[in-house]
Image: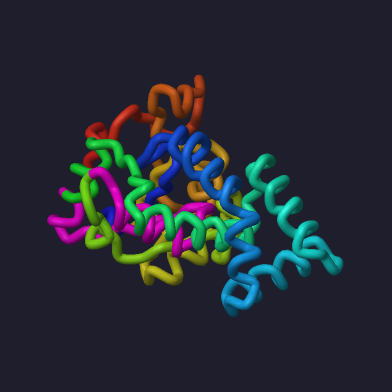
Amino acid sequence: MIKAVLVDIEGTTSPISFVKDILFPYSRERLEKFIKENLSNPEVKRILEDIKKEVGKELSVDETIETLKRWIDEDKKITPLKELQGLIWEEGFKSGELKAPVYRDAYEKLKEWKEKGIPIYIYSSGSVKAQKLFFSHTEHRNLLYLFSGFFDTKTGNKKESKSYTKIAENIGLKPEEILFLSDNPDEIKAAAEAGLKVVRIVRKNDAEYIDDFPYKQVSSFNEINL
C-alpha cells in the first residue's frame, strides 16, 4: 500500500523547457552582478567558500564567476551552484518576473492525493530553497501547502539507490510504501533498487518512451491510481 508520494520536478510536474530556457539563463545573466553586490552577505560568503572547496583551490571573484557560468552551461548538479541560483531566482519570483509552470494534471492529482491524506514530498537537484520558491510562485498560485517535505542534492545523488533509502528513513516509511515519480530512467532504476514503487512520467517534448523499460511508463498523472 502506498503511504507517500515522492516527486521529481523537471519533466515530471513541470516542463523541462522552463528550467533550461528561462531559469538557467536568468541566473547566468545576473550571476556576476548578484555576487559582486553580495560579497558581504554571510550566506553568499559561505557558498563562495564551498565553491573553492569543490574545485580544490583558491579562486578570485572573477574566476569563481567564470566557474559558475561554466557549471550552468554544463548543467552541473553541484550544491553551491544550486544554492546560489536559488538566491538569484528568489529575487525574480518575488518581483513577479518569474512564475513557475506546473502541468494541470500534476496539480490536480497532487491536490487529490493531498486531500486523501497522502503526504507528498519533492526530490529535485534544485536546492530546497529553489524548490520552495518554485512552488510558492506558480500559475496555480502558492502550492506549498501540498507538500510535506523537500529533498535536494544534500541528501545524495538522484541516480544512486542509497539516496532513496535515506529519504525513506527520513520520511519514516518502508521503501515499498513510497511511490516515486520521475521522467529520468536512471532515477527510476535507482529508486526501484532501493525498494520504492516507481512510475516513469513520459511527457511530449520532455521525454520518450523506452521500449522494454522494466517499469511502468505513463504520459500523465491521470494514469496513476493509488
Position of residue 40 in the picture relative to residue 112 (left or right):
right
Asked whether the viewer can see residue 162, the reply is no
Percent x, y of residue 60: 81, 64
Percent x, y of residue 101: 33, 40
Q: Residue at x 48, y 23 (%)?
A: 208
Q: Quadrant of the N terminus?
A: bottom left
Position of residue 100 in the picture relative to residue 42 (left or right):
left
Q: Is residue 199 above or below residue 162?
A: above
Q: Residue at x 36, y 65 (%)?
A: 149
Q: Residue furthest left?
A: 115
Q: Is-magenta flag for residue 46?
A: no
Q: Which residues are magenta?
A: 112-139
Q: What is the total number of numbered labels drawn onto the structure image?
A: 0
Camera-nearest residue between 195 and 59: 59
Asked whether the viewer can see residue 76, the reply is yes
Q: Residue at x 22, y 40 (%)?
A: 225
Q: Is residue 206 above or below residue 86?
A: above
Percent x, y of residue 207: 47, 27
- Residue 147 image-quadrant placement: bottom left
Q: Residue furthest top?
A: 211
- Residue 162 image-quadrant placement: bottom right
Position of residue 176 in the picture relative to residue 212 (left or right):
left
Camera-nearest residue between 170 and 29: 29
